[in-house]
Image (cartoon, coloured by chain):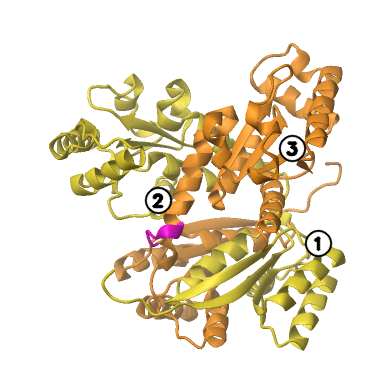
Chain colours: A orange, B yellow
Amino acid sequence: MTQPQRPSIYFNVHLVSDSTGETLNAIQRAACAQFENVQPLEHNYYLVRSERQLERVMKEIEAAPGVVWYTISDGALRGRLEAFCRERSIPTLPVLDPSIAMLSRHLGVAPNNRVAGQHALDEDYFERMEAINFTLAHDDGQNVESLIGADVILLGVSRTSKTPTCVYLANRKVRAGNIPLVPGVPLPDFMEKMGDKGPLVVGLKISAERLVQIRRQRLISLNQDEITEYADEEAVRDEITQANRLFQRNGWKTIDVSRRSVEETAAGILNMLHERWGHS
Amino acid sequence: MTQPQRPSIYFNVHLVSDSTGETLNAIQRAACAQFENVQPLEHNYYLVRSERQLERVMKEIEAAPGVVWYTISDGALRGRLEAFCRERSIPTLPVLDPSIAMLSRHLGVAPNNRVAGQHALDEDYFERMEAINFTLAHDDGQNVESLIGADVILLGVSRTSKTPTCVYLANRKVRAGNIPLVPGVPLPDFMEKMGDKGPLVVGLKISAERLVQIRRQRLISLNQDEITEYADEEAVRDEITQANRLFQRNGWKTIDVSRRSVEETAAGILNMLHERWGHS
């Protein structure tokens, strides 16, 4: 960075949830990213479900005033928090209210104000847990014999973020597996035979420049300063060419991860899956 | 279930994001959980950043009218989507607008309307990826020699959801490891010696009834119908007593997971971590 950065504006954000705080975290990250040079100081309070817990939260809000975003269903607790903040001119936002109000109008049904209903131990929950377990069991070419049960199989040479992408997909309820492409090591037999009926196969592509950069950083972090084939530019170029040919030969979809975050790669794969499943 | 369920109301929800759709997914799950007997039919569109992509989305909205929730920063695309839906009386909600407006007022700064700013490949991003990699490398007692670098270490007997809880924590940027408690197998040496300076240690407790139930289901799913010590009520009770004594002897915090979802267990652990780090 050659340009001097303007000093950051620091401010307190209190995220108060009667559930796990996922919604608040997503909103906080997305909303704060809309401002330059601001540094939110996050205060998180999860599973706030009693007057006593709320009192503790309010003490902390008073000690570090800022904005208060919350998801609390219980009417009495909401009222208490709102009144407390109003008296102190602290701005509050019940972030789910507009969505719930719209649904209520659209469906003609009143909300039930149930706490953390989305974390019921229901079918959806067990499907999500199953996706995580499946994904961890099928990381990095493990248990290939049951990999056919995946929703998606990622292929890529070393350091193309296969593992974190799979973990991210698992959190979105996708059974994801991955197989590393290692020069000289053939793919499991079934991969090139299963055709369109098997799992979605996605090849992760990357530019040689970017991959060399990532691998050299990796070697440095492992205190290995010798440049092996692993990070040699020509060898890497060869490795990538072979991988790309494999993807093309099989007509597999690809995503270029050179300049993409893992979350964006995963979102691209989710788009492919939705398209495949015939609805988006 | 003895009570007959009322038939569900099915309705279409279109989630349109110029980013990865995380915020929309969290809001959709939390908001829909506020209504009984409703079944959202989700239509997801991620990374929608061009007129052409938006046209495809609008075609699908027209084919399956419902509610449209979106996070789109680009003014022209927003205007196009809003006008399209207004003409067809389809309700829309730009879910981030209230949060962004509040921040803008609070900070006295205008938003930059940058697309997917939260997915910049910045320090925060690499910390999150590092948390995922660390967590996968330290699942199930692997690599104990570097486990001391964790933020949190979970302990628990088999089938207390240690692994999915760790994965969930990793997604919240926590370096989490876990060690299974197996009767007759001692903990790694450092665990009972490190005191308060090491990682937060949390013991996962569970009732014997619940654990027997989970393990028997597990055996059935593995097609093993013989009841071994693993699922024998008395043996399980012993195993749990030993685990609880270990937690108590070391003064380790515990969470009872008998009736909790993994997300709620993780939220409880996040609360403990925030408290430990001296700010919430």
Discs 3 and 2 share one subunit: no
Q: Amino acid at mark 1?
A: Arg
Q: Nearer the viewer, residue A138 or B222?
A: B222
Residue B99, percent from left and from top: 63, 71
Left or right side of A11 for A22: left
Q: CA distance from mark 1 to mark 2?
A: 34 Å
Left or right side of B147 for B171: right
Quadrant of image for the C terminus of chain B = bottom left
* Mark 3 or mark 1, whichever is nearer to me: 3
Residue A123 lies within the magenta run: yes
Quadrant of image for the N terminus of chain B = bottom left
For the point 33% across and 37% down, which residue is it?
B223
Tell me if residue A127 can be seen. yes
Residue B112 lies within the magenta run: no
Q: Which mark is residue B262?
A: 2
For the point 65% across and 71% down, which residue is it?
B14
Q: Nearer the viewer, residue B195 or A257?
A: A257
Tell me where residue A34 sits by quadrant. bottom right
